[in-house]
Image (spheres, rainbow, N blue to C red):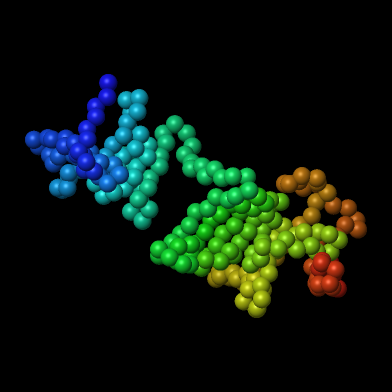
């Protein structure tokens, strides 16, 4: 059957209760409003399917999906939980578009996207922005680009797995500092084995080069070529 209620642009159903505030279902000016009582207490909106609660909006306006317990007080506006296995959120976009999570502290301009976690499906890379500018990118090949979106070519057509670029001393340098109450230093370690898979430890042979530091420079060819080596 069909229940049809019509009262101009403001149709309201009151759900009365002698012990608690009334609940309201209201159609007003083209919008549907679901309301619980306004007095103190556990006033919530709950949706169940197949005899089990699926989500609720509690009296503080927090959305709880798959749980009745909110998360940590610094991140409790939305809580998602699952007791039957892994829990996740899927962002599905067109093959030539992207999915993004924005961190905002305002409602206009750069403040709407001060921080960004994004994925571009057209070129299949993930990127991270701070202060509304991209700072870090992971390419479709798994290369980590810091301070650049350009996957540069180095000696012999090699693209390095980690690349950092900048326009001044602060953005074109990295530092390793060790803080310990002893005489031990910081380390930069180069390793090599004759194995053919990650984690291998096959012995090297005489004449193998264990590590190299290259000093590369652009020469106008579109690549960076070495001008000095330390082996």
Decide if residue 164 is on the left or right side of residue 230. Answer: left
Decide if residue 125 is on the left or right side of residue 129. Answer: right
Decide if residue 20 is on the left or right side of residue 159. Answer: left
Give how far across and how far down residue 23 sits, in percent.
Answer: 18, 39
Which of 115/179 is in front? Answer: 115
Q: Is residue 113 visible?
A: yes
Residue beneath the point at 48% across and 57% down: 102
Q: Is residue 44 visible?
A: no
Which of 98/57 is in front? Answer: 98
The quarter holding residue 214 reads bottom right
The quadrant of the image that shows the C terminus is bottom right
Residue sitting farthest toward the right: 207
Residue sitting farthest toward the top: 1
Give how far across and how far down residue 26 sits, in percent.
Answer: 23, 41
The quadrant of the image that shows the N terminus is top left
Give how far across and how far down residue 150 sits, in percent.
Answer: 70, 63
Residue beneath the point at 26% across and 49% down: 60
């Amino acid at each position: 059957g069909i229940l049809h209620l019509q009262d101009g642009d403001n149709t309201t159903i009151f759900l009365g209760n002698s012990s608690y505030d009334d609940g309201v279902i209201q159609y007003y000016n083209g919008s549907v409003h679901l309301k619980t009582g306004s007095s103190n207490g556990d006033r919530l909106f709950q949706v169940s399917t197949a005899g089990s609660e699926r989500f609720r909006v509690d009296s503080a306006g927090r959305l709880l999906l798959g749980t009745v317990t909110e998360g940590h007080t610094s991140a409790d506006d939305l809580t998602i939980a699952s007791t039957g296995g892994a829990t996740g959120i899927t962002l599905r976009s067109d093959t030539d578009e992207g999915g993004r999570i924005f961190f905002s502290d305002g409602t206009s301009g750069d403040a709407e996207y001060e921080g960004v976690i994004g994925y571009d499906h057209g070129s299949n890379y993930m990127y991270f922005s701070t202060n509304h500018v991209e700072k870090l990118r992971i390419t479709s090949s798994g290369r980590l680009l810091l301070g650049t979106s350009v996957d540069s070519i180095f000696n012999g057509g090699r693209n390095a797995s980690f690349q950092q670029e900048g326009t001044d001393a602060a953005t074109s340098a990295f530092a390793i500092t060790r803080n310990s109450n002893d005489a031990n230093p910081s380390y930069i370690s180069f390793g090599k084995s004759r194995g053919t898979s990650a984690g291998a430890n096959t012995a090297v042979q005489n004449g193998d080069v264990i590590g190299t530091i290259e000093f590369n420079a652009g020469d106008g060819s579109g690549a960076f070529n070495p001008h000095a080596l330390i082996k």
